[in-house]
Image (cartoon, helix red, strand yellow):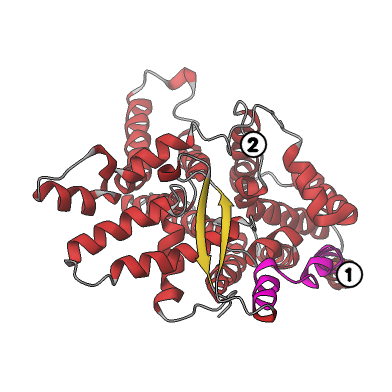
Amino acid sequence: MIFPDDLRAYSGQVVVDALTAPDAAFSERLAAAHRTAVEQTGARPALAWFTAIPAALGFLRIGDLYIPFALCAITTILLIWLLGNKWFDAITAFFSALWFATSAASVGYSRSALPVGPATALMVLGLFVLTNSAGEKRNPWRIVATGGCFAVAFAFHPAYLAYLSVPVFLLFMPHLKTLAPRHESSPVAQRSFLRLFFECFCLVLPTILIVILYDAPQVLTNGVHGRFAIADMSYVSGLRTLFDSPTIYSGVHEGVLFWPEYLKSAEGTLGFVVILIAIVSFAKFSRSAASVVLAAWMLLPWMAFALWPNLNSYGRLYAPVLPAVALMVGRGVSCSLMRLPVRVRTALLPLFSVLIIGTGLAATTPFLRTEGKEPSLGRYMDANKFQSIIGFVRTDVRSLKGTRVVSVFTPD
C-alpha cells in the first residue's frame, strides 16, 4: 500500500473513462464525469479535469501526468518576472524570478501533481491582469477575469479561497483616502464605497458561479428524467463535507510558526537567512503601494491558515505565498543595490545572482537526486511482473465518508 496524495493525478484518466463510456448519452457521460471529478479528488474537481488533458492525449505512463504541473511552474516564473517589472523594476523582476526558479519549495511542487502549481500560476496571472498603470480606472472585465483566475484556483483546492483576500485588498487600496473616517459621509466617499462594492462583487462572482454551476450537468440531466436527488449536487456536498473531515482537522493547532519553519526546512538555514535579510531590506526601503499589497499577499493567507481553529497545517496551503516571498526577496535585493554607486552595483549583481542560485541548488539538489515515488513504484512492478497495483490514498472524498479512495494504475 502507498499513500502519496499525488495519486490524485490518476483521476484524470477516470474522467476520460466517464466521458468515453459506451452506450450512454453525452449528457449522461458529462454528468458522470463531473461527479467523478469531485469524488476522485475530494472536492478539487479542477485537478481531475486538468490531468484529464494529458490522459486524453494518451500520456498515461507514470510521471507523464506531472508534465502539465511542471509547465505551470515554468509559467509562474515568467509571470513573476512580468509582475515584478510592472510593480517595481527590472532588477526586482530578475531576482524574484531567479529565486522562485531555484527555490527548493517551488521546485518540489513542480515535481508533484498537487494543486499548488496550476493554482499558483492562476493567482499570479489574476494579479497581473488586475494591476493597471497609474491613473487608469479599473476595467470591470479585468476584475471579472481576475475573479475567474481565483475561482479556478479555488476549484483546485477549496482552501485557496483565502487568497481571494489579496485582490480584494488590491481593489481597496485606491479607495483608502476617500473612505477614511473624516470623509465617510461625503458624496465622494459614498460613490467610492459603491464602486468598491461593485468591484468586489465582480471579483467574487466567478467563484460563486463555479460552485453553483459546476453540478448543473448532472442536476439538469437527472432533473429532466425525474431522477434528481440532493446527491447530484456533489460539488456543494463535497465542500460541505470538508469541514467535517478528520484529515483536515486534527485538534492540534500548529499556529503562526508553521510557515516560517516550513520555509526554513525547505530552503535550508542559509537560504532562510537570505530570505530574512532580503525581507528586512524590503520592509526598510520599499515604500510603494505595491509593497503594501505584497505584504498583504504574505500576511493575509498566512494568518488565515495559522489562526483557523484546529486546522492541520500543510505546506500546500501556504505554497501560493511563495511568489510573494520571491517578489519580497527580489525587491529587497533591488532596494539594497539601488542605494549603492553604479559601479559597485554592477559588480555585485553577479555575486547576488550566484548567492541566490547557490542557496537554491544547495537545498534542491538532495531531493532532485532522490527518485520519486511513482517511478520507483513502476520499476518495482516491472521487476515483480505486477500488471496493476492498488493504492489507498488518505483523502477527504465525499463518497467514501472522509477515509480513503482506491486507485488502480499500471506502470505503463
Total marks shown come to 2
Q: Quadrant of the N terminus?
A: bottom right
The answer, for residue 148, to whether it is visible in the render is yes
Q: CA distance from mark 2 to mark 1?
A: 40 Å
- Tell me: 353 left or right of 380: right
Between 228 and 99, which is closer to the camera in this rendering? 228
What residue did someone put label 1 on?
351
What residue did someone put label 2 on?
312
Type of amino acid under label 1: Leu
Asked if residue 293 lies in the magenta stretch, the reply is: no
Magenta span: 355-381
Main secondary structure along the magenta-highlighted residues = helix
Q: Residue at x 37, y 18 (%)?
A: 185
Question: Where in the figure is residue 141, as x and y percent of width and height?
Answer: 32, 54
- Tell me: 96 left or right of 393: right
Q: Quadrant of the C terminus?
A: bottom right
Q: Residue at x 9, y 50 (%)?
A: 224
Question: Where in the figure is residue 81, as x and y percent of width and height?
Answer: 62, 66
Q: In terms of image quadrants, where is residue 271?
A: bottom right
Type of amino acid under label 2: Asn
